[in-house]
Image (tube, grey):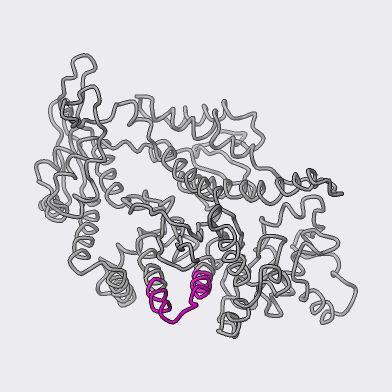
């Protein structure tokens, strides 16, 4: 419901402690009141317009089988948690395919109405503006289902000739076949969701100048790659690891077969699949490698869970055992004055970090983007607040703050500024601007900047001192609070647009470090595994222009120490998110807000406290 917060900011709801309201929307009997409220398609037409009336109408529509509502420009979609007859059938599809741009708001609200508007806008602005649809909502709200149905409808709009139908259907089917692949490699069990997306995806349906679909790409963003090596209590790695290692479990075995079939359907043949699963097995084996303390002044002793553990990893990843051991247990030091290089043994904790670095790096490699006119469908994970929140939740909630700012600017501030410029008689409405919260997270002096600075300092990590630095530097920000009394569990709270979230200080800086030693890249580039060779090509090294040869060839060398030490997890996360936001800003954006009506995923149950 936070997407509606700006619509109701001036008229707060009068709600009791138990979540109920003091009076009904109209002083009529319950049946008449429900019928009256359910016919209101656009929530902005309510009078009075506040949280109380908005919730009443959404619930009334939900109880009468109307799961979509307009909220001005955005569409509100409530998850029914059941199959609803006629909601997506061919008759409904044909109905919305026939409507024109001016008739969209005259029809009942539906995701197909959004699809028709997006396609009409693409046809009108083909040469100047691409289109995007942002599908947001918490886990379990129906984002993936909504995205899938919307993609079906948009591709169906292009089927104007029989000879094109087969081609379009093949493209659409390949996109559909990508769903089990994306879920296997990008979804995982969390404490609140058995199938939680740990990444965002931006599906681009690409069109030619005649508005005919010619292809599609799926770009992934914000992958929670730390899950490969670290999971909170009660959580698991990505599904693909369970599928690959639980052959005796019927559910996982069936899921693995579905994943393999989907890989084949999108053009990944059996040989390449074997290479992929070899790498996945290699990552699992690598994560099982353990280390023991040694005399770090002379050598570093490595202790394996099994004697053949490293050899198994090498067989799967295509590396040499001696090279892998040296890469894990020693780090390269380059003197500043002479450029002389030597290997220094690593401590146990450094060995673990290098092991995890290799595992995360191999898993996180993504395919390249493509260039076409497109309609983009963004399905991104929602706001999170767990019992224990760390760097992953901080980044996810930061992404949601950025999307909220995008919504506020495009559909509140900018619209009202246009009214004023055109001289329309309009009383400027107050709205919640989350810029101060974003400044707290990403600004010049912010949580991110302090974390990055701590990573650059060559000293042992100290949770207590970093917690003190956060409190001292950010105490004046009204969106930041720390506990009044010190405790063993160092934490701080950020007051987000959705709610306040407490984050654990311990582990933040350690997770944020994402230094990739050049010897790790060199090790993977020397792999005999053809897929790893393709993933780690010479683009991972930078040219030394000072040593440019006469023939124009550049000898490659490792990046500077300063540059590598500053490329942290939040740095990459912020950069990835900024690229996504830049793409969205260059398009004409449409919003769908998915709502989870109850936490137990039961049909017919509308919990107002859950929705709020």
| The N terminus: image quadrant | bottom right
Q: Is residue 445 left or right of residue 336?
A: right
Question: Closest to the observer: 319 or 369?
Answer: 369
| The C terminus: image quadrant | bottom right
Query: Percent position (x, y) of residue 93?
Result: 58, 79
Query: Percent position (x, y) of residue 104?
Result: 68, 70
At 82% across and 53% down in the image, what residue appears? 11
Q: Is residue 69 left or right of residue 201?
A: right
297 lies above or below 442: above
Q: Main secondary structure of the magenta part?
A: helix
Query: Percent position (x, y) of residue 18?
Result: 74, 62
Which residue is most to the top?
337
Quadrant housing residue 269: bottom left
Number of on-image labels? 0
Which range of residues does the magenta coloring cover?
148-171
The stretch drawn in magenta includes residue 151: yes
Query: Percent position (x, y) of residue 7?
Result: 75, 55
326 lies above or below 83: above
At 48% across and 38% down in the image, what residue appears? 505
Quadrant housing residue 543: top left
Question: Closest to the observer: 434 or 188?
Answer: 434
At 77% across and 68% down in the image, what residue appears? 56
Q: Is residue 407 left or right of residue 290?
A: right
The stretch drawn in magenta includes residue 251: no
Q: Is residue 480 left or right of residue 579?
A: right
């Amino acid at each position: 419901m936070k997407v509606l917060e700006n619509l109701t900011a001036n008229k707060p709801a009068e709600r009791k402690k138990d979540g109920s309201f003091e009076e009904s929307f109209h002083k009529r009997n319950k049946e008449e009141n429900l019928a009256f409220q359910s016919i209101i398609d656009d929530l902005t037409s309510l009078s009075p317009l506040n949280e109380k009336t908005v919730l009443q109408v959404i619930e009334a529509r939900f109880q009468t089988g109307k799961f979509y509502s307009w909220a001005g420009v955005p569409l509100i979609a409530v998850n029914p948690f059941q199959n609803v007859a006629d909601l997506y059938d061919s008759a409904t599809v044909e109905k919305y395919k026939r409507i024109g741009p001016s008739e969209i708001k005259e029809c009942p609200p539906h995701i197909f109405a959004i699809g028709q508007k997006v396609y009409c806008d693409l046809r009108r602005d083909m040469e100047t503006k691409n289109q995007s649809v942002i599908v947001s909502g918490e886990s379990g709200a129906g984002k993936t289902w909504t995205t899938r149905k919307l993609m079906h409808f948009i591709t169906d709009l292009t089927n104007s000739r029989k000879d094109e139908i087969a081609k379009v259907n093949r493209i659409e089917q390949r996109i559909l076949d990508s769903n089990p692949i994306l879920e296997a490699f990008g979804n995982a069990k969390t404490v609140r969701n058995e199938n939680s997306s740990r990444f965002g995806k931006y599906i681009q349906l690409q069109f030619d100048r005649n508005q005919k679909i010619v292809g599609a790409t799926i770009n992934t963003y914000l992958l929670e790659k730390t899950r490969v090596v670290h999971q909170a209590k009660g959580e698991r790695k990505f599904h693909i690891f369970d599928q690959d290692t639980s052959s005796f479990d019927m559910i996982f075995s069936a899921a693995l077969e579905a994943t393999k079939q989907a890989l084949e359907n999108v053009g990944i043949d059996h040989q390449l699949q074997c290479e992929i699963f070899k790498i996945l097995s290699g990552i699992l084996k690598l994560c099982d490698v353990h280390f023991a303390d040694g005399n770090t002044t002379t050598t570093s002793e490595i202790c394996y869970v099994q004697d053949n553990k490293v050899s198994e990893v090498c067989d799967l990843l295509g590396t040499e055992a001696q090279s892998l051991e040296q890469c894990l247990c020693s780090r390269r030091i380059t003197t500043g004055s002479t450029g002389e290089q030597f290997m220094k043994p690593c401590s146990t904790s450094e060995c673990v970090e290098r092991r995890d670095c290799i595992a995360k790096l191999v898993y996180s490699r993504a395919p390249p983007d493509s260039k076409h006119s497109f309609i983009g469908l963004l399905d991104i994970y929602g706001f999170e607040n767990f019992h224990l929140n760390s760097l992953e939740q901080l980044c996810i909630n930061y992404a949601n703050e950025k999307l909220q700012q995008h919504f506020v600017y495009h559909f509140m501030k900018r619209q009202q500024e246009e009214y004023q410029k055109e001289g329309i008689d309009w009383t400027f409405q107050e709205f919640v601007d989350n810029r101060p919260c974003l400044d707290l997270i990403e600004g010049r002096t912010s949580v991110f900047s302090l974390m990055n600075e701590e990573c650059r300092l060559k000293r042992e990590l100290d949770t207590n001192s970093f917690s003190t630095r956060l409190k001292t530097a950010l105490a004046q920000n009204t969106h930041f609070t720390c506990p009044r009394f010190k405790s063993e569990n160092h934490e701080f709270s950020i007051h987000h647009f959705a709610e306040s979230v407490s984050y654990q200080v311990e582990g933040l800086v350690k997770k944020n470090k994402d230094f990739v030693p050049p010897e790790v890249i060199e090790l993977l580039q020397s792999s005999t595994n053809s897929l790893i060779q393709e993933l780690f090509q010479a683009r991972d090294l930078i040219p030394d222009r000072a040593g440019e040869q006469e023939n124009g060839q550049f000898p490659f060398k490792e990046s500077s120490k300063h540059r590598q030490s500053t490329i942290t997890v939040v740095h990459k996360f912020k950069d990835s998110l900024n690229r996504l936001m830049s793409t969205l800003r260059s398009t004409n954006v449409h919003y769908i807000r998915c709502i989870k009506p109850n936490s137990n995923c039961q049909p017919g149950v509308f919990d107002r406290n859950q929705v709020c």
